[in-house]
Image (cartoon, rainbow, N blue to C red):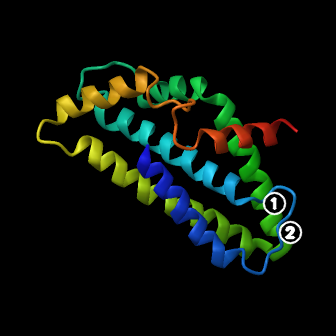
Amino acid sequence: MISLRISAVVFLLSLATIANAQTTTLATSESRDASIAYIGVANFVVGRVGRDCLALLGRLEVPKDFVAVWQQRNAKYLQASQKYMDARINEAEVSGGVGQRNAIIDALTKSVRGVAESTVKSWLNQADKTEACKRSVAIIESGAYDFSPSSPMYGELESLAAWAQR
């Protein structure tokens, strides 16, 4: 989960130049930007573990179902993330047009993908991929990869969820 914090920092730095001329509006905040990056990385990692490990482990469920179970347990944060991202993109488009909107989307995508791929690599690129997959799937299925009070950005995630409830 430490690497997820790195993704948030990278994402914020990417947005700094994009948002330089943009005044902060009601939805836009650094904390919420960091939270959606953190959530995006986790979601990506779960998807990749499902894609790369389930068949190797002889599991019959499809990766989409594996991800859906994790997403259901973390729905509060995923839904808040989607609501914020929609507001963030809308604000960017209103203030800077389609180019600004696309720049925000591209910055988030690049940040999340880079950190998430690195995380997946560190989890799965082991001498014994089967054992690495068993560990990774177990971490996700046990709830240890869920957002919880022990998550490094839990306070920010809770703030995002509270914002989304307004």
Residue found 64% across the figure and 70% down from its top: 15
Q: In the rendered structure, which amino acid carries the disc numbered 1?
A: Asn
Crowd band around label 1 with a 10 angstrom C-alpha radius: few (<14), some (14–19), many (20+): some
Image quarter for residue 107? bottom right
Residue 112 in view of the camera: no
Q: How many badges with numbers are in the image?
A: 2
In percent of the image, x 65 and y 40: which residue is there?
155
Say if 34 sits above or below 47 in the image: below
Dividing the picture into quarters, in which one does residue 25 lie? bottom right
The answer to whether residue 165 of the structure is visible from this angle is: yes
On residue 50, the disc is none
Mark 2, residue position: 94
Instruction: Using residue 35 as the reference point, say whether residue 131 is left or right of it.
Output: left
* Amino acid type shown at disc 2: Val
Residue sitting nearer the eye, 60 or 126: 126
Residue 122: x and y in percent read 28, 47
Q: Tell me the quadrant of the picture where the C terminus can be found.
A: top right
* Residue at 76%, 44% in the rendered image: 83
Image side of residue 158 versus residue 70, left or right: right
> Residue tagged by mark 1?
90
Tag 1 and tag 2, C-beta contact below 8 Å: yes
